[in-house]
Image: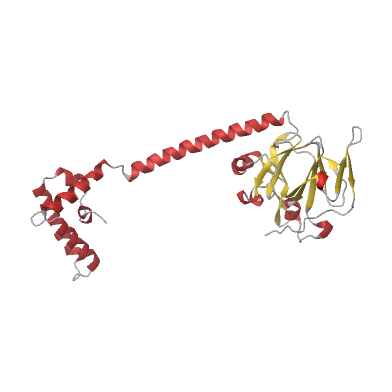
Amino acid sequence: MRNPFEVLGLSPKIVKELDEVSLFRLVKACYRALQQVYHPDLISGSGERALELNLAFEALDLQRNPESFRHHRRRYIKRLSRKTLRSRLEELTLKLTRVFREKLLLEENFWEELLRRAQVERHLLCPPPQNLKVQLYDLIAKYRSPFPAFGSRAPFKELYFDPHGELYWRYPQKAPRKAAQVKLIGCVLREKIEPWFLLEKSPGGEDLVAQDYMKAETFRRACLPFLRTTLTPNAYLFSVRHGDFTRLYLEGLILRLTPLEDSPTINVKKPSDSLQICEKYTDFEAPWDFSWP
């Protein structure tokens, strides 16, 4: 409920500076002037507004109800000690600026730490994966395909980590190959980003063709705050290639993580110093329970 002095258009400063008699004279003058505008019998009148003015004047009638007058005056004057809306807004803006500056600083430090670790480590995943199969949905293949693909042509791929943490890729109906120049850096949960709007595009006829990478500044702005260095299902997996951190590659959407020793289709053996990936079946194992919105 508004203070009666506020209803009559008086500021807390004026209410504080005037004595009671002078202030009540001003209250009567404001009340009469406003009634000439909002009286219900006038064209510009408003019954609701006129009633509000009457109630405000009754609460501030110094002659009939001096206690009410003084009570509302004391409460209204207290507003002068409160922070104004402008000062509150300035305070929040300052806090927001500080938080944003701290965010940029943390982002810069995190990025520098990733670059430092990339110089000495095989992958930036923690803990380093071993004896693991990762099934991926290849979004780039999906974006570039004009028609839905099923069966062996579906955009799925797999990667494997051997007992020593070496990385191998496998595409449908193709033998696994070692990914010596690929360094995985982590993943971002699916609900946090929309890759199509972040990937670089190139002209392709009438449409834009999505590339399989985004620029480093784009990744730092949109993905780095949500980056996880652990492999997580239903998350987008990112990598760098050939030690070039100016581009971050989208490897795909992680569908499933399977220990190799428990896999129904893959056995990993290591005779002498070489790795052999022996397949029991020649068909590519597609996770058909995956649905794309």
Q: Give the farthest residue toward the right.
A: 272
Query: Compared with residue 199, is residue 288 higher up or lower down, i.e. above or below?
Result: below
Q: Residue at x 46, y 36 (%)?
A: 98
- Count every numbered label the image shows and give the total: 0
Quarter of the image that includes the N terminus: bottom left
Quarter of the image that includes the C terminus: bottom right
Residue 167 x %, y %:
80, 39
Residue 229 x %, y %:
67, 39
Query: Nearest the camera: 48 or 227?
Result: 227
Q: Residue at x 67, y 29 (%)?
A: 116
Query: Nearest the camera: 32 or 281?
Result: 281
Q: Residue at x 76, y 57 (%)?
A: 145
Query: Nearest the camera: 259 or 62?
Result: 259
Query: Nearest the camera: 21 or 145?
Result: 21
Q: Is residue 45 visible?
A: no
Residue 239: quadrant of the picture: top right
Q: Is residue 153 visible?
A: yes
Residue 252 x %, y %:
73, 48
In the picture provided, is 98 more to the left or to the right than 153? Answer: left
